Image (spheres, rainbow, N blue to C red):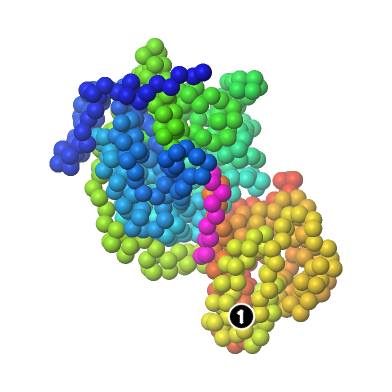
């Protein structure tokens, strides 16, 4: 049985340091390099390790039962953990962030619990598909920005994210994504990428950072050395990027090189890139596998740090993802991540109860023991802790409490939401139109809506009703939840559903080969001469897997999906703007609410990836 080392064994009384007072902290800001050297010289090994760990506390249960509740307010156990383990950073997720006053109070209490330096308070507010604030301005997402092609809009998106995050107390945002989505079958990046053009990716990412850096919020590019050309999701598996080094340099590397001078940090990818590191490891199942970039000294130190001369923070992607936990011992993988060159280990242990805090104590004991017998490892801890401390001082990270009332005037303000809608309207891309759009509404209309999920249908119906009010028409809307990529609906059933319907909206979501139900709906509508539009609600590639489509638009995101915890949230701006391009009112052209202006930021290829169906830069207008 593994012996649990009590937390009290790890820390001597002399290792405790009081929270640095505000006046002393401001003095350190004036000479961050010298101050960092003085601090690191007087820190215990445990304190240095604490600066390198960024924990998540999504849920909490005092009794370690199976029924845990979201962690939304500070408690004595977590507060003590922050101080006892000298933790330097936390990451917050949607589970933690209920509304603006609660978020401000939680973050203020995290900073109050600190042992010495202010904490990095981080989140993943990428925009679009990955957003963490339940109340906030999401923006339509990176690929939507790519479809506009306008760098100033990316800057405005970053500016709003920065303003809202800093008003809440966040000081670190994990974005922008600079992965080049050059594999349309990529299950995890997709619309999180600006484009499959590395130059456009770099241009928009730089602009986004310029916007967010108008506020004291750090940024992190992700995911080095590139996550765009994978066919599996690192939350569940360990994928390989099988490209040669020259191709990698030309495509995946280019945006990192372009944007590296502007960012504060770079996050790693749990992907194997044999062209950069061909080392073979043996996993916990006894299988021979490649070395993921997160654990690769060749990739992070030799390439990123030494060859590319990146001097900012390097941090791991979440260490609780399946690509790591499904292959390696937790303690060993964290040590290897540090040896590889990571300065911050993200989510080493999911903190959720007192038992997991004990596991954190075991991790400290392991890392300290390894450092005492391995001078190289001890030096790596020293170097990374110094870099973290210097960054906090140089970037003037403050623990000052934030005001909830003021934050409420900023977060999700009308001005921010109006700009969010204006940007998404610029992104909507009309890919195909054979005389279907804009569909002329009459005084009374009957519409059928199909999608994979009830909440998606409800969102579509909500905005259709808003359109009806604006255009002063009546819409009789029916909807049906159908798993569009499966083969369940018969022709007769579809014919019954389309009885007396005048217009069909087919909202698809990341289709793959042979989406039988979706194709059958199209076939029946065509046979009955009922106008139908396919709305690709996430990745724009759906039309590649369908035939005889008469009208198709891409909106680059309707439902955000936090894959790490299966939490869904609606991105209303994308569907709102997409629907507004579909119709004209009874008065004609003057009653068109919006015109599709976006251009594809990616090539849409045939399912075998051999031929381009619709090239990057392609986009129609309805009139």
Please determine whether, in this image, residue 233 is positioned above or below residue 555. above
Residue 515 part of the magenta-drawn span = no
Residue 567 part of the magenta-drawn span = yes
Q: Residues within 10 Å of mark 1 (few under 14, many from 20)?
A: many
Give the residue at x 40% y 21%.
Answer: 5
Give the residue at x 63% y 66%.
Answer: 457
Q: Identify the residue under disc 1.
A: 584
Pinpoint residue 591: horizontal percent, then vertical percent. 56, 83
Residue 100 versus residue 491: which sits nearer the camera? 100
Pinpoint residue 304: horizontal percent, then vertical percent. 45, 30
Is residue 98 in sight in this rendering? yes
Give the residue at x 64% y 52%.
Answer: 603
Pinpoint residue 65: horizontal percent, then vertical percent. 50, 40
Q: Quadrant of residue 289?
A: top right
Please determine whether, in this image, residue 403 is positioned above or below residue 344. below
Q: Which residues are magenta?
A: 564-573
Please determine whether, in this image, residue 534 is positioned above or below residue 119. below
Q: Quadrant of residue 273?
A: top right
Classify residue 332 as left or right of residue 27: right
Is residue 205 in sight in this rendering? no
Q: Secondary structure at mark 1?
A: strand
Pinpoint residue 572: horizontal percent, then vertical percent. 52, 64
């Amino acid at each position: 049985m593994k012996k649990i080392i009590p937390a009290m064994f790890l820390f001597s009384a002399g290792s405790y340091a009081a929270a640095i007072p505000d006046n002393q902290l401001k003095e350190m800001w004036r000479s961050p390099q010298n101050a960092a050297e003085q601090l690191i010289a007087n820190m215990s090994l445990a304190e240095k390790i604490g600066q390198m760990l960024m924990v998540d506390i999504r849920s909490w249960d005092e009794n370690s039962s199976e029924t845990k509740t979201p962690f939304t307010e500070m408690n004595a156990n977590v507060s003590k953990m922050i101080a006892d383990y000298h933790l330097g950073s936390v990451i917050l997720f949607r589970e933690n962030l209920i509304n603006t006053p609660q978020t401000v109070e939680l973050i203020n209490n995290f900073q109050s619990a600190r042992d010495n330096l202010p904490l990095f308070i981080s989140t993943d507010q990428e925009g679009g598909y990955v957003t963490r604030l339940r109340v906030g301005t999401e923006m339509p997402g990176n690929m939507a920005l790519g479809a506009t092609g306008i760098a100033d809009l990316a800057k405005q998106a970053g500016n709003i994210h920065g303003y809202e995050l800093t008003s809440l107390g966040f000081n670190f945002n994990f974005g922008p994504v600079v992965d080049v989505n050059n594999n349309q079958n990529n299950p995890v990046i997709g619309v999180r990428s600006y484009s499959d053009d590395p130059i456009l990716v770099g241009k928009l990412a730089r602009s986004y950072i310029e916007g967010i850096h108008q506020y004291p919020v750090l940024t992190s590019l992700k995911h080095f050395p590139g996550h765009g050309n994978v066919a599996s999701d690192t939350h569940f598996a360990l994928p390989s990027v099988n490209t040669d080094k020259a191709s990698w340099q030309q495509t995946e590397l280019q945006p990192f090189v372009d944007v590296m001078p502007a960012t504060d940090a770079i996050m790693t990818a749990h992907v194997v890139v044999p062209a950069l590191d061909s080392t073979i490891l043996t996993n916990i199942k006894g299988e021979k596998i490649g070395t993921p970039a997160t654990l690769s000294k060749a990739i992070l130190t030799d390439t990123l740090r030494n060859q590319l001369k990146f001097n900012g923070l390097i941090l791991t992607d979440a260490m609780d993802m399946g690509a790591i936990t499904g292959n390696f011992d937790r303690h060993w993988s964290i040590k290897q991540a540090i040896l590889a060159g990571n300065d911050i280990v993200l989510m080493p242990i999911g903190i959720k109860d007192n038992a997991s805090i004990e596991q954190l104590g075991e991790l400290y004991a392991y890392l300290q023991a390894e450092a005492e017998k391995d001078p190289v490892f001890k030096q790596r801890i020293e170097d990374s802790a110094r870099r973290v401390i210097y960054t906090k001082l140089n970037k003037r990270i403050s623990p000052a409490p934030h005001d909830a009332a003021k934050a409420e005037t900023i977060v999700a303000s009308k001005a921010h939401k109006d700009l969010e809608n204006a940007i998404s309207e610029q992104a909507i891309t009309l890919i195909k139109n054979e005389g279907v759009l804009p569909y002329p509404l009459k005084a009374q209309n009957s519409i059928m809506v199909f999608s994979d999920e009830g909440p998606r249908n409800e969102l579509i119906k909500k905005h259709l009703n808003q359109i009806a009010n604006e255009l002063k028409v009546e819409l009789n809307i029916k909807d049906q939840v159908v798993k569009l990529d499966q083969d369940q609906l018969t022709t007769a059933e579809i014919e019954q559903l389309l009885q007396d319907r005048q217009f069909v909206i087919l909202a698809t979501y990341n289709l793959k080969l042979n989406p039988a139900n979706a194709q059958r709906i199209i076939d029946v509508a065509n046979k009955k001469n009922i106008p139908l539009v396919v709305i690709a609600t996430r990745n724009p590639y759906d039309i590649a897997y369908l035939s005889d489509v008469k009208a198709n638009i891409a909106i680059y995101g309707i439902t955000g999906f936090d894959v790490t915890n299966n939490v869904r949230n609606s991105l209303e701006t994308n569907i709102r703007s997409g629907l507004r391009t579909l119709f004209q009112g009874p008065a004609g052209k003057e009653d068109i609410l919006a015109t599709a202006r976006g251009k594809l930021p990616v090539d849409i290829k045939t399912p075998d990836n051999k031929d381009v169906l619709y090239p990057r830069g392609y986009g129609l207008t309805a009139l």
